[in-house]
Amino acid sequence: GMPSAPPPVLAPRRPTRKIKVGKVEVGGDAPISVQSMTTTPTTDINATLQQIAELTATGCDIVRVACPSQDDADALPAIAKKSQIPVIADIHFQPKYVYAAIDAGCAAVRVNPGNIRKFDDQVKQIARAAKDAGVSIRIGVNAGSLDKRLLDKYGKPTAEALVESAVWEASLFEEHDFHDFKISVKHNDPVVMVRAYEMLSERGDWPLHLGVTEAGPAFQGTIKSSVAFGALLSQGIGDTIRVSLSAPPVEEVKVGNQILQSLNLKPRKLEIVSCPSCGRAQVDVYTLAEEVTAGLEGLEVPLRVAVMGCVVNGPGEAREADLGVASGNGKGQIFVKGEVIKTVPESQIVETLLDEAMRIAEEMGEP
Ligand code: SF4
C-alpha cells in the first residue's frame, strides 16, 4: 500500500552530537534508545548473560553492568563478548577499572564526576585510551554522589549544582579533545531532574541520557519516570533513557519502551485501547481487557485492539482500531479494519478476538 506519513511528535528532537555505544548510535537523528542495568552479581557471568538475553528479548538496546571490584572487572571480557547488545561498565571510583573495561571490549564506560577528582590528572589518559579503543563515555552526575565542592557551594544537589558538575566534567574531557561522551544529571525529584536537563541542554550539544534516580518501586517509579521523561521528551530533550525501578530490569525496559511509544518516538507495537468502563458498561471490561492483553502478550506486530464496554464510544473506537469489540446486550460486535465481521455471545468475545488477532498477525508476517 501507500507508505503512511510518520506519526506526529510533540516537538522536533533538539540537535545533539551523535556518538556510538558499540553498534548503537546515541544522539543526533538516532532513535532514542532504551537502557537498563543488570542486577546479577557481575562476577556471575552466566546469570548476567542470561539476564542480558532477557533484556534484549524485551527490547533493551544497551545494558549496563556494575564494576565495583577487580573480580567484576575480570568478568567483563566474557560478558562484553557474548552480550547481544552493547555493554557499558558502570564505574564510580577507580580509574584502573576504566582501563580494564576498555580492554575488556565494553562499548562504553560510565564514570561519576563526583568521584573523578581523585583521578583528575588521569582524564587525559582515560580520554586517550577510550579514543584509541573507540569506546564512548557517559558522564553520570548523580545527586546522591555530587562533588563535595559543589555540595558546599550550593548546600544541596540543586539543578544548578548538577549542571555545574556535568559541564565542568565535560570540559575536562573536551580539553583533551575527547567528544565521544553523553551526560546524565540524575535526581530522585522529577522537578529538579527536569530543570537540570533543561538547563544542561542549553549549555551544549552533548547527547543526554535521561534518568530519575532511585525512582522507587514499580508503581511510583513508573509514574515518576514517565512524568519526568514526558516533560523532557515533549521538548525534544533526551537521546537515550533508563527507567530506574526497584523491580526486575525487564520491567524497566517495558516501561521505557512504552514511554517512547506513547510519544510516537518509537513505532507502536501491540496496543490495547480499552475503555475505563462506567455505569453504561454491559460487559466486564476489566476482565475482558486483561484476558485479551494476556492472550496477546509477546505478539510483535503493530496491532491496535479496541475493547469497549458499550455501544456509546464502542463502535467508533472499535472501527478505528485494526480489531475490536463493541459490547452490548450480552453480545459483542467484532470489528476488523472498520467492518463488523460477526456478532458473538459474550462468552466467545475473547477467543474470537484472539483468533482474529493471530490471523491478522500472520498476514502481517509474524512468524
Ligand atoms: Fe462507559 Fe461505554 Fe465509554 Fe466504556 S465505552 S467507558 S462502557 S460509555
Image (cartoon, rainbow, N blue to C red):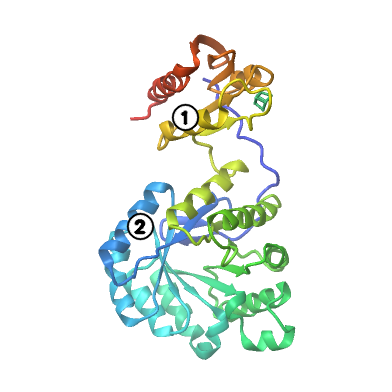
The count of marks equals 2
Q: Residue at x 57, y 22 (%)?
A: 283
| Location of residue 231 (image quadrant) | bottom right
In the rendered image, which residue does mark 1 sit on? Answer: 292
Horizontal placement of 315 versus 72: left or right? Answer: right
Would you identify the image quadrant in which residue 300 lies?
top left
Say what amino acid the circle numbered 1 marks: Val
Residue 138 sits above or below residue 362 on the image: below
User: In this figure, which residue is indicated by the disc labeled 2?
Assistant: 52
In-image side of 348 versus 185 (left or right):
left
Instruction: State the CA–CA distance, disc 2 to disc 1.
Output: 28 Å
User: Disc 2 marks which amino acid?
Assistant: Ile
Which label was assigned to residue 144? none
Of badges 2 and 1, nearer the viewer stands 1
The earlier-in-sequence mark between 2 and 1 is 2
- Vertical placement of residue 210 versus 164, above or below: above
Q: Is residue 27 visible?
A: no
